Amino acid sequence: MKVLAALATCLLSFASLSAMPIPNFQPLGTLGLIYNSEGQMCATLGAVDTNQIKAEIGMGYNTKFTTPTGISAKIGIDEGVGHKYSPSFAVGVFNAGIRARHAVLEHSNVYYALLGRSERRYLNGRGYLGVFHGNRVMGLERKGFFVGYTQYLFPTALTPQKSYDKVALDAVYVSGKSALGGFTLTGKYFIKPTMYIQAAPTWEFNREFTGPMGIREVSKWSFERVRWVVTFSIDL
């Protein structure tokens, strides 16, 4: 009940936070709070963990814009279910919203499916692949795929039986020129297992550049397209 009260009090909504969904789930009964340098806040609650099925729900809000609160949800299974080599699988939605009839559509309602697989013996990393589809808020390009890889570094013992990784490096590529299209490199430092800070440069493929002669072409890999986001997260 304490966790549910905290969720209701925060009134936050899940936004993409310059990152696509990842394979892992928020632990059951815990509340993950995130705030980043762009004024985005989100809360994610671990809602289900039973019979090898997991689910989470979230809400988010941006303090710099007037976009209404958005909603996210994800359900799936961990890797190794059914067979030791089987990947994790999840389906979900983010930046979703509920609107009255004839009201202006403001949320992109991005649906996705996601596969993930870890390799802890040699690489100590995890790869994942997904597809997504949004609505007309995203413009003409509203679907695509994303692929990512996370490398875990500097394992640290908490107890003789339990440890965690102090650093995680993540790379994510999102196809196309939609509002989600781009490439992000993230460096994440865990202050403790339930608290981290991260910094991420993101190349935005959909961004237009204007000058005296109007819109000009810029390579999608140009550093002019890069924006930096710093994020702080804690689990309660």
Image (cartoon, rainbow, N blue to C red):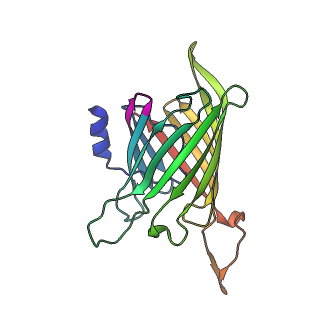
Q: Quadrant of residue 153?
A: top right
Answer with left or right where residue 95 lies relative to residue 192.
left
**Nearer the observer, 226 or 101:** 101
Does residue 190 appear in the picture of this structure? yes
Q: Position of residue 225 (x, y in %)?
A: 65, 65
In the image, is residue 208 above or below residue 163? below
**Segment colored magenta:** 46-53
Q: Position of residue 105 (x, y in %)?
A: 37, 69
- As for residue 52 lying within the magenta part, the answer is yes
**Nearer the observer, 230 or 183:** 183
Most extreme residue toward the top is 160
Residue at the image point whose x is 68% and y is 66% from the top:
224
Answer with left or right where residue 22 lies relative to residue 226.
left
Most extreme residue toward the front is 82
Most frequent secondary structure within the magenta stretch: strand
Residue at the image point whose x is 46% and y is 39% from the top:
76
